[in-house]
Image (cartoon, rainbow, N blue to C red):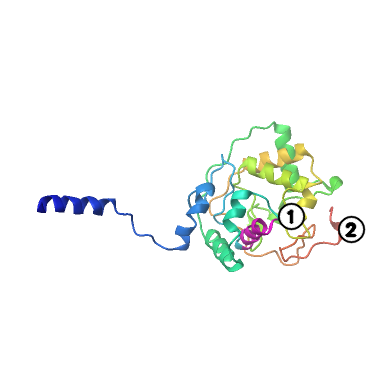
Amino acid sequence: MCVLGACLSVSFGASAAPAFEDTLAQRLQACTGCHGEQGRASPGGYMPRLAGKPAGYLFHQLLNFRDGRRGYGPMTSLVDPLSDDYLQEIAAHFASLDLTYPPPQPATASAATLERGERLVRQGDPAAQVPACSRCHGDAMMGVAPAIPGLLGLPRDYVNAQLGAWRTGKRRAQAPDCMAHVAKQLSLSDIHAVSQWLAMQPVPPGAKPLAAWPAGQRLPVACGGVGVDAVEASGASR
């Protein structure tokens, strides 16, 4: 009996559930189920990377899901009961992660399409009143703290879908909604070109969002929640 008791004791001890460590990182395992380990994501999937994004941007997106400006049931269900303070904690956690980026996706578009995509990203299309992506997201396309996201290291299908959602009004942001304004000036082929070109760009080692908006520089269009002045309406297409 003593031997049996010892065996049972060992058996029960081995099958006992591990102690739960109540940390923010542990609680956010629900996020990493879709967004990848530590919010790293992968270039071939659909879900966007969270790690290293500006905290203000992540916070505003969590607010947008919670408050109905962005519509995606699983996200809304997760954040609906959470307070502003807790959402800020979540945003700060993912923003603090400094993780390497995976290799970019290979291009699946023609050379002409990629050339058009690069032109829109770097120069915009003044005739269509489309500012260059780099005017807001930075020359390195890594974003600007605290509220402007980077565009590199995102899945092609995700970029394509988000631009399409802004174009149709499915996705919204705080007014004035600058991305909705820009996306509505883009054709479907332009959206395809931009997403193709961005997805094939490698992220340089150590690349991070700019720490602050450059002094004296203005946004090409007014943008809610960013805290940066825009140029006058007459100069928005320059």
The amino acid beneath tag 1 is Arg
Q: Main secondary structure of the magenta part?
A: helix
Q: Quadrant of residue 175?
A: bottom right
* Residue that carries the numbered disc 2 in the rendered image: 234
Residue, far front: 1
Q: Which mark is residue 61?
A: none
Query: What separation in Å lies between label 2 and label 1 (alpha carbons)?
Result: 17 Å
Viewer can see residue 131: no
Is residue 112 shown to the viewer in this render?
Answer: yes
Q: Is residue 175 left or right of residue 54?
A: right
Give the residue drawn at x 73%, y 43%: 164
| Mark closest to the chain's N terminus, 2 or 1 | 1
Residue 131 sits above or below residue 113 on the image: below
Q: Is residue 141 magenta?
A: no
Toward which corner of the image does residue 158 lie, by quadrant? Answer: top right
Residue receiving disc 1: 135
Magenta region: 56-68
Q: Where's residue 238, x and y in %?
A: 84, 53
